[in-house]
Amino acid sequence: MEKQDYYKTLGVDKGSTQDEIKKAYRKLVKKYHPDVNKEDGAEDKFKEVQESYEILSNESKRKAYDQYGHAGTAGFGGSSGYGGFNGYAQGTPFDMGDIFNTFFGGGGGFDFGGSQQQTRVRGSDIKYRIKLNFDESIRGGAFGVNIERDISCSYCGGTGSKTKKMKVCKTCGGSGRIQKVQRTILGSIAVNGICNDCEGSGEVPEENCSKCGGTGVKINRENEKIKIPAGAYDGMVLRFRGGGNAGPKGTPSGDLYIEIEVEPSREFERRGSDIYTKEGIKIHVAVLGGNIKVNTPYGKVTLKIPKGTESGSIFRIREKGVPILGKDGMKGDLYVRIELEIPKKLSRSEKKLWEELGAI
């Protein structure tokens, strides 16, 4: 099904302020809320409004959407769920997969099976930003990033226990959950939550590890090579599963998010997968025609200028644009705008030739 236009869904213009967007959102939420509107399609419309506001209320997501459409918001995850890029399987189109499989040739040696394990706290996500110049974003490749994160303690095997043996948590009795009483204006309410002492596992170290203090993790700092896909754009977010902080006492690691910042090019302007540039030509070439050399991100190419070319004419050079994400080998196009070079200073002989030409 075709994705809706977020601005159209909220009934606002592309240049609307955040206050205008919020006002339109609140009005539509009240109109289509399932508890209020029982008409067919109201719930779907409510979800569309929620999704639209999620993107347009966030400046980073809105910028990516304005420039690249739904493809630009896919890397942020959430409810956008755009499926246009088939090259990145499992998750969002910019999900780069398991960081251990990607860079270390294995799954990291973790086994997180069992229903009890699923209730346990996982490690936190971490986010870093990498700055690329225009050419680097076009080519992609592996780039070094200094990353600091918690990793599993090798001394205790991530258990937090010096003896690597565990015992039943006395706080929760091995259930992994405790009941807390919270006072509200309506009175005291009992709430079940994860046990802080055992992080929901139901077990605690027999004897705390002296290296990690019983947490099962330690801080690691190193420069890691991060794979950036060819055609990456400014504001793109890459997700590497399991690349975040290791969880306490052997629980799963969080994810690593890399946000890409691309420095603008002085020569090229990117619009989606196409590139635009300008090229000056001498008047006699515009009149008589000829061949000129044009710069592309992949080197110079020859462009044929037909006779009688006017200033402002635009020529397309196929597949010299940006690699299309998820489509191996496919690229956008390069568009060249022709500008005539008018001589500002003339020698006597040149002036005489122009005068003779003008008299014809």
Image: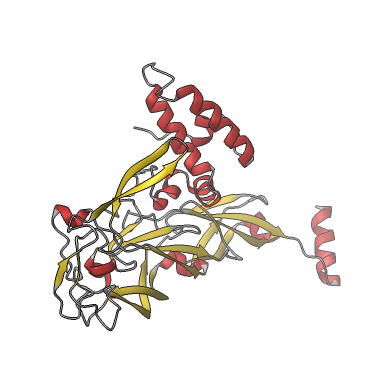
Whether residue 181 is visible here, answered yes or no, is yes
Q: Residue 208 occupies which quadrant of the picture?
A: bottom left
Position of residue 1 relative to residue 159, above or below, is above
Q: Residue 240 occupies which quadrant of the picture?
A: bottom left
The answer to which of 260 and 335 lies nearer the viewer is 260
Q: How is the image coloured?
A: secondary structure
The answer to which of 311 and 113 lies nearer the viewer is 113
The residue sitting at 49% across, 28% down in the picture is: 29
Location of the N terminus (image quadrant): top left
The residue sitting at 38% across, 50% down in the picture is: 77
Q: Position of residue 36 (x, y in %)?
A: 44, 20
In this view, which residue lies farthest toward the front?
187
Whether residue 144 is visible here, answered yes or no, is no
Q: Position of residue 227 (x, y in %)?
A: 35, 69
The residue sitting at 21% across, 60% down in the picture is: 201
Position of residue 134 relative to residue 37, above or below, is below
Q: Position of residue 350 (x, y in %)?
A: 81, 68
The answer to which of 151 and 292 lies nearer the viewer is 151
The answer to which of 323 and 247 lies nearer the viewer is 247
Q: Residue 44 occupies which quadrant of the picture?
A: top left
The residue sitting at 54% across, 31% down in the picture is: 26
Position of residue 121 relative to residue 165, above or below, is above
In this view, which residue lies farthest toward the top?
39
Is residue 123 toward the left or the right of residue 126 in the image? left
Q: Position of residue 282 (x, y in %)?
A: 68, 62
